[in-house]
Amino acid sequence: MGHENYIWNEKTWADFERNTRNRVRWTSSESMVWDGLVRQARIILRTYSTSFFIVTRFLPPHKRAQVEMIYAAVRYPDEIVDTFEMDTEEKNRLLDQWLAAYELGLEQDSIRAALRHGLPSFIAGFTQVIRETGIPHAYYRSFIDAMGHDVSPGTFDTLDDLIENYIYGSATVVGYFLTYVYGARQDGEFNRALQCARNLAIALQLTNFLRDVAEDERRGRLYLPLDMLHAEQIDPNDVTASVYRRPLGRVLKHLGWITDDYYQQAFENVDAFAPDSQVAIRACIEVYRQLNSHLATDSEDHIFARASVSIREKLRVLPMSKYWRLPLAYLRT
């Protein structure tokens, strides 16, 4: 998935889970438990992604809360494979444990029932979102499968291979989660909304790959299609070697413009979503498309220096009439 800061280790997550459970333990209603979990999920979102935190402020409160819960449910497995200092066997064990908790959570009829079974707080909250929105159960299983790939990474022959065999599980299904939350403008538009979500998810994930080439290589991962590297005579086992700086820049620039096409396709179909979600989706496209443009334009410069979009640049593409929501959001967290 990628994120903007590496802050929490395994102990931090365990402490946060313990604190979250303590906060909701004595609440007297299901709605109060939900509100408590959402407040904690919001902290995770704001900690890990300033950009996504900002754009989700433009959603109506109930949809925003569901999105925050989804983010928490996908963030933790991603952190297991990305930042927890443990061996492959232990990471796989934690992923299996998390997936088993998800399956048990699906069998419960409320958040409190899930918590009584000892399930993690954000599994309890996420499975409630599934019950409310009808998200197909198989999507999250595909997500966990993709996280398992990152534990023992492989390579991808072509862009289509990368999209179908990794991005589908790591990002596309997350876009589908959000589509069920956002809703369609009308019943006949839901499939078009899903296609829009797919294009945006592919674009967002490719932008992450473009930004994190050196970091991914340090982790033993390669998300650049082999055929693109071979065309520039780049050794896939040493893509960031200084001798490949210029040809790798050409690969990243080419992939950056392909990514922009996915952003454009998504932008052209945002109107398929429910009107109260469109502002946030457009803001997401504009913010991350701006980052992608930086990466594609100055591709060689960003191989080792992680690119970002400043707050000023982010605000420039956000709707001015909604600015008041941003300081309020930070004060409330």
Image (spheres, rainbow, N blue to C red):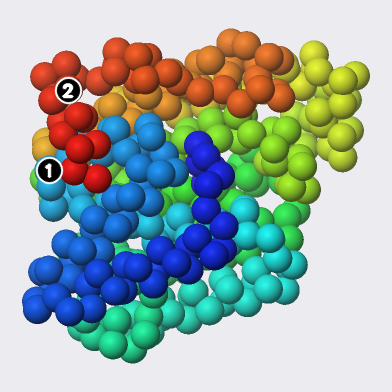
From the viewer's perspective, tell me whether residue 213 is left or right of residue 193: right
Mark 2: few, some, or many residues within 10 Å (few <14, many ≥20)?
A: some
Q: Secondary structure at mark 2?
A: loop
Say which of marks 1 and 2 sits in front.
2
Residue 114 figure quarter: bottom left
Q: How many marks?
A: 2
Residue type at numbered disc 1: Pro
Q: Is residue 227 above or below residue 16?
A: above
Q: Which residue is mark 1?
A: 60
What residue do we see at 52% from left, 40% from top?
A: 5
| Residue 214 spot, x, y in % from top left | 73, 33
Q: Which residue is mark 2?
A: 323
| Residue 308 spot, x, y in % from top left | 51, 23
Q: Is residue 87 above or below residue 298?
A: below
Q: Is residue 92 above or below residue 304?
A: below
What residue do we see at 48% from left, 63% from top?
A: 13
From the viewer's perspective, tell me whether residue 63 is left or right of residue 85: left
From the viewer's perspective, tell me whether residue 143 is left or right of residue 215: left
Q: CA distance from mark 1 to mark 2?
A: 15 Å
Q: Nearer the viewer, residue 140 or 29?
A: 29
